[in-house]
Amino acid sequence: METVILVIHLVVALALIGVVLLQRSEGGALGIGGGGGGSAGNLFTARGVGNALTRTTAWLAVAFFCTSIALTVIATHRGSGSVIDSVTPPATTGTQPAAPAQGSGDSAVLPKLAPAAPAQPQVPVSP
C-alpha cells in the first residue's frame, strides 16, 4: 500500500511541476510564457487555457497534500521510529581519561604538541 501511494505521490509531483511550468507568467520578467493569445491552438481561448491550468494546479496540489499526509500516517503507524533511535552508542573500554590539573589549562582531548622552535627570518638580513 505504501509503495502505491508513493508512486502516486511521485506522479502527482511531476505533473504539478509540469503544469506550473506551462502556465503563463504574470510579470513576464524573462519574456517566457508570454507569446500572446492563441498560442495553445484553437481548442481553448487564452483565458480558458489559463483557467484550466489554474484548476489543474489546484487539484494536483490537493492530491499532493493528501498523498503526503497519507505517507506520513503510514510511516508513523509502522512504528519503526527514527533512524537516530536505532543507533547504538560506541562501546567504552571502562577506563576514564585522567582529568587535567586545576588551572593548568590543558585538555585531555587535544594531543600535546612539541614547543615551537624560535622563529628564524625567512629573508637574509644584511649586517
Image (tube, helix red, strand yellow):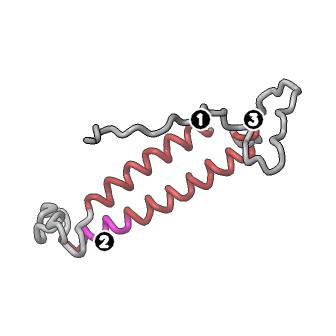
Quadrant, the C terminus: top left
Q: Earlier in the sequence, mark 1 or mark 2?
A: 2
Tell me the distance, in whole angstroms, between the alpha carbons under discs 1 and 3.
44 Å
Residue sticking out furthest to the top = 93
Q: Is residue 52 above or below residue 1?
A: below
Q: Which residue is mark 1?
A: 115
Residue sticking out furthest to the front = 127
Q: Is residue 33 above or below residue 69?
A: below
Q: Which residue is mark 3?
A: 86
Q: Which residue is mark 2?
A: 51
Specify start and end residues of the magenta stretch as a single range: 48-55
**What amino acid does circle 1 point to?**
Pro
SS label for mark 2:
helix
Quadrant, the N terminus: top right
**What amino acid does circle 3 point to?**
Ser
Tell me the distance, in whole angstroms, between the alpha carbons under discs 1 and 2.
76 Å
Magenta stretch: includes residue 44: no
Toward the viewer: 22 or 100?
100
Q: Nearer the viewer, mark 1 or mark 2?
A: 1
